[in-house]
Image: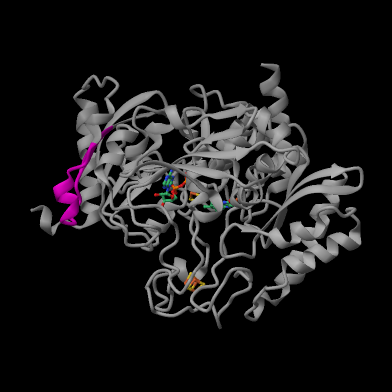
Amino acid sequence: MRPFTYERADGLAELARRALQTGQGQVDAEVQFLAGGTSLIDLMKLDVLRPRSLVDITPLAAEHGTVELRPDGLRIGALASMASVAVHPGVVEQYPAIAESLRLAASAQLRNMATIGGNLLQRTRCPYFRDPSWTACNKRLPGSGCAALDGINRNHAVLGVDTSCIAQYPGDLGVVLAALDAQVELAGPRGARRVPFSTLHRPPGGQPHVETTLLPGELITEVAVPAGAWTRRSLYLKIRDRASYEFAIASAAVALDLDGETVRSVRLGIGGMAYRPWRAAEAEAALTGKPLTEANAEAAAEIALRDAVTNGHNAYKPELGRRTLVRALLQARAM
Amino acid sequence: MSGTLNRREVLSGSVLGVAAAGLGGAALGAAGPDAVAATPAAAAQGSPARAEIVLRVNGRDRLLAIDPRTTLLDALREHMALTGSKKGCDHGQCGACTVHVDGRRVLSCLTLAVAVQGKAVTTIEGLSAGDRLHPMQQAFIAHDAFQCGYCTPGQIMSAVACVHEGHAGSPAEIREYMSGNLCRCAAYPNIVAAIEDARNQMERS
Ligand SMILES: Cc1cc2nc3c(=O)[nH]c(=O)nc-3n(C[C@H](O)[C@H](O)[C@H](O)COP(=O)(O)OP(=O)(O)OC[C@H]3O[C@@H](n4cnc5c(N)ncnc54)[C@H](O)[C@@H]3O)c2cc1C
Ligand code: SF4
Ligand code: FES
Ligand code: FES
């Protein structure tokens, strides 16, 4: 690990004023906020992230680490631990997909350490990204190419990719937040602002080293999930290579509002195979107003994976994605 | 001079520093967070800047002068001679380094030592009451819940927290909530049995 200075954040206002050079996901950003450290310290040990300075934001947890259930929706402080949100009774009861996506992520130890903000900003597990001895990785070394395109790419993404990068977004919670129209509250040098979660992560766009739309020095302070008739009947289905303590190879977030058998409203997220937290909006439109039958679920899944691009070892993903989505829809119907 | 020291020598130098502080019997109060900043100029030049920190481990305050890069795991093992916590992967993937911070199980390999000042750290060495083993330790022996023993301290620390969290209700639940602790010897069935047994004893007492 390279040398760095360590300091604790004093408060939001002070942090914001300093306009820290935290970049937008670039591996060579000079400053990194330290939350749980479970993604950051790991990647610093691997010499992928190389900050000169760490600013520990966990002291902000007192103000930005709680969960609040309001009539208009759910507010989750960015410094709340994954573990605390996963067992929050209001989240479990009214936003079960959120609780489920956290409960099924990582391990109990990691969930105690890791925060909601850090979880959303965790880096890809692409092995060529994580090992600097590989010289071709556009995310690490802009313009160097992508070793995964014709490398071992069984776990790489098929949705939202281009030829500059096919890395998979590994997080679970993000998939649910994409489906539930979440917003993130940000604080930074230019003040506070609130943006749709769906705009936080950028598409690769030939520049996969720029990962987020955060401004330099900007922090996530809160996640806001709007209330809706569909949140109670929501679930997160995670498919993995082993039963627990593993990232998804496919996942689906479903939130459903039914009128009898008919879909009044549905929200769909897809994980384990997309470049960023993925919302299947066209598939939602195809289901709305129709009875939720297996055939209609299959038709919607077909639409959701229609634009998938495979690169060899990950050719199995579109079919797995369709089946995962269909199963999740039928399970949500039975809730 | 320090320019010719390699990292290992620098680290062992700080062990002496700790020992000296211990022998001197310096009374250490709770150090405020501000006492902890590393020397920015030195770190920027790439030389190992030291941070003076106080770690509360197993109920005792210890003064350490460490490089801010030091993980809690390395601080325990290399600077305090507490080698019970094990380094398996050093990347959050195996659970061998599990300790408790403020009563919650965490991975010491992904925790910076400078970040846990003012918090209570408990390691496997701090679990027994003198010579009386914790019920979980006793149950691991009774159920032969290990072979090589390398994962065992992490398993036990994790298992104690698992019971306290209320996540040891059934074998299935134990398996799920202990999945962050890998055992290369695959002692899993006996580990689950030990945890069920210890859970019953812990709930009785
Ligand atoms: C073995 C293993 C298995 C895992 N399995 C899963 C899994 O199955 N599912 C899953 O979803 N995740 C999984 N993870 C990832 C884990 O959940 C993330 O590492 C964790 O959530 C990151 O949170 P953190 O608080 O530790 O972030 P940190 O590591 O502290 O930070 C990550 C990044 O986010 C930035 N950051 C953090 N908080 C903020 C903020 N509030 N505002 C702005 N920037 C911020 C940091 O500067 C850094 O760049 C796994 C990790 C490991 C090591
Ligand atoms: S998929 Fe992306 S992260 Fe992985 S090697 Fe290619 S450019 Fe790098
Ligand atoms: S050594 Fe910490 S998890 Fe493996
Ligand atoms: S007893 Fe050998 S690794 Fe678990």
- In the picture, the quarter occupied by the N terminus of chain A is bottom left
- B41 or A198, nearer to the observer: A198
Can you name the residue that lies furthest to the front here?
A289
The structure residue drawn at horizontal position 27% and vertical position 25%, both measured from the top left corner, is B32
Can you name the residue that lies furthest to the top here?
B205
Q: Is residue A240 visible?
A: no
The structure residue drawn at horizontal position 56% and vertical position 54%, both measured from the top left corner, is A198
Occupied quadrant, residue A7: top left
A84 w.r.t. B6: above or below: above
* A59 displayed left or right of A198: left
Can you name the residue that lies furthest to the bottom here?
A150
Can you name the residue that lies furthest to the left here?
B1
Span shown in magenta:
B37-53
Residue B126, percent across and down? 47, 29
- A268 or B18, nearer to the observer: A268
Residue A274, percent across and down? 61, 64
Residue A283, percent across and down? 75, 61
